Image: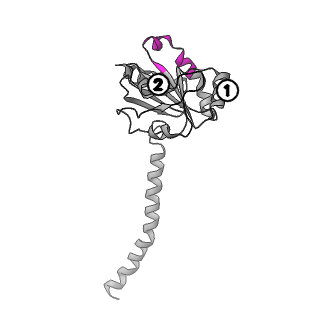
Amino acid sequence: MSDTEGRTPRRRNLLTLAPLLIFAALALLFFVRLFAGDASRIPSALIGQSAPPLDLPALDGAAGLRDADLRQGHVSVINIFASWCLPCHEEHAILLDLAADKALAAKGVKLIGVAQKDDPENVRRFLGAKGDPYANVGVDRDGRAGIDWGVYGVPETFIVKGDGTIAFKLVGPMNAQTLASVVRPQIEKAMN
């Protein structure tokens, strides 16, 4: 028996094991990435950039949302929501608390709503039943502004500095802990 005949079965065994080794490596990589961080902190390319232009119609009885509204020297908290969104319903009490914060209001912080892909009548009913925390609400019926802002889904919250620069983005609903440990510190940071 020659040397080349003896090596051929060994090579075949290695080639047979290659797909299994590749699968095991990929499975390990996916498992490690599964626990690699908080999915609500999806990075945004807009952080540190000027907010995309806005020109959204008003919800009846309230002011609409214009680009100049975000460049008036005060911090704005932009909450993207929808009446059909269950997490938005869960988050709503937290937004009412944020809007009622007299210390933030004294510093000029405004909470602004953007109704994403929603019917204005449904938004009116939602805010009428649950309370309206927003200084004004813009209606983004076709979702175009959401695309420009890089919205993944609702709810999402942006903190915009007084010069119109996006300082922070939170994906998903706020809860009391997130408000206290993430959103409020980011608001304070944006004021400095």
Q: Quadrant of residue 11?
A: bottom left
Given the current orientation, which residue lies at the most extreme left position?
Answer: 3
Residue toward you, 150 or 71: 71
In the drawing, what numbered circle is on residue 77?
2
What is the distance, in whole Å, between disc 1 and disc 2 at their CAs? 22 Å
**Magenta span:** 95-110
Q: Amino acid at mark 2?
A: Val
Q: Residue at x 42, y 33 (%)?
A: 53
**29 above or below 61?**
below
Q: Which residue is mark 1?
A: 125
Position of residue 54 in the picture relative to residue 95 (left or right): left
Residue 104 within the segment the image draws in magenta: yes
**How many C-alpha atoms fall within 10 Å of the one at disc 1: few (<14), some, or many (≥20)?**
few
Name the amino acid type tagged 1: Arg
Quarter holding the N terminus is bottom left
**Can I make out residue 39 in this image?**
no
Taking the magenta stretch, the answer to whether it contains residue 9 is: no
Residue 39 percent across, percent down from the top left:
48, 39
Image coords of residue 77 (percent x, y): 47, 24
